Image (cartoon, helix red, strand yellow):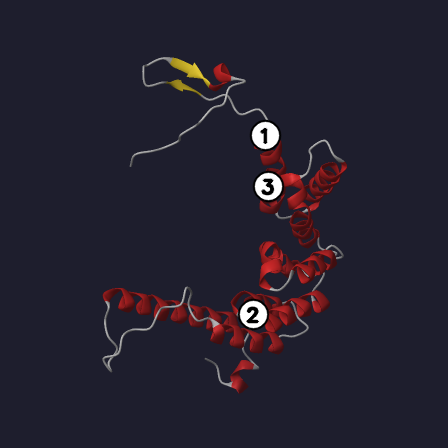
Amino acid sequence: DPKPEAQAKASAADCAAVIQKMQQEAYTDWRASIKKAREGTANDDGKPVKAVSMRPDYGPVAKKAAEFAAQFAGTDDAVQFLMLVVQFSTDKDAQKSGIEQMLNSHIDSPALAQMGRMLDYLDRMISPEFAASTKKRLLDSKNADVRGWALLASHKGSIETADRDGAEYGTAKKALLAAADAVEDKGLAKEIRGAINLREKYGVGCDSPDIAGIDLDGVEFKLSDYKGKVIFLDFWGDW
């Protein structure tokens, strides 16, 4: 852990390595506590082992990340540390502050695309209102990938549930296909198109792919043979 005076000279990569080491140590300590609890081992004072947390204690990681974010404030290097504050802090105010700093100072940065997968959880992490506001602000980014993630998060519900013949679905599909064509992240483009394909090929009201096989009596059959009937499909495996 670099001294304060050394931190001023440390590169973002050096600071990221410090964070990574802290994460690993927190995870190792957590796994050790789980093992101890499972073995029913008493503490040195003979008292029972306390219940183990559902995840490692990353509080110190979030605190250190906040320090590094302040050190690199005004540069895109701050984004990776602000992301860790949002990810690992249990303080909603700290999480909200981290996101607001990214929106205020890094809205056009390609690094902000890292927030993409967080967007589906912001309503539970902070509040539905804050989540909606964040998605709206991200749509103003000059970076196509950042806008793509915001559009996917904003329209995913419509793609999954709206009437496919209705205006809501049509608007969402048009916006997402345009985003998929514009983004540089091929994985994001695939995910956007995949959400649409999933709904249009396998959603409620779509024809099921025609499954073919042999029944328990050795008779060949196809799913389409039972069209119009109620079918119960039981998929199982033996490993």
Q: Which residue is mark 2?
A: 85
Distance, label 3 to label 1, CA atoms, is 15 Å
Please report the residue visible at 71 percent of the width from the left and 69 percent of the height from the top.
Answer: 105
Q: Earlier in the sequence, mark 3 or mark 1?
A: 3
Q: Which residue is mark 1?
A: 201
Q: How many numbered marks are there?
A: 3
Left/right placement of residue 75 relative to residue 232 reads right
Distance, label 2 to label 1, CA atoms, is 39 Å
Q: Position of residue 23 (x, y in %)?
A: 44, 69
Q: Residues within 10 Å of mark 3 (few under 14, many from 20)?
A: few
- Residue 190, numbered label: 3
Q: Quadrant of the C terminus?
A: top left
Tag 3: residue type?
A: Lys
Tag 2: residue type?
A: Val
Q: Nearer the viewer, mark 2 or mark 1?
A: 1
Comparing 237 with 79, the one in front is 237
Comparing 198 with 107, the one in front is 198
Disc 3 is placed on an element classified as helix
Distance, label 2 to label 3, CA atoms, is 29 Å
Image-quadrant location for residue 156: top right
Disc 2 is placed on an element classified as helix
Quick one: which residue is furthest to the bottom in this view?
5
Tag 1: residue type?
A: Lys
Q: Position of residue 227 (x, y in %)?
A: 53, 17
Q: Is residue 233 above or below residue 59?
A: above
Left/right placement of residue 137 relative to residue 202 reads right
Comparing 205 with 159, the one in front is 205
Disc 1 is placed on an element classified as helix
Q: Is residue 133 above or below residue 17?
A: above
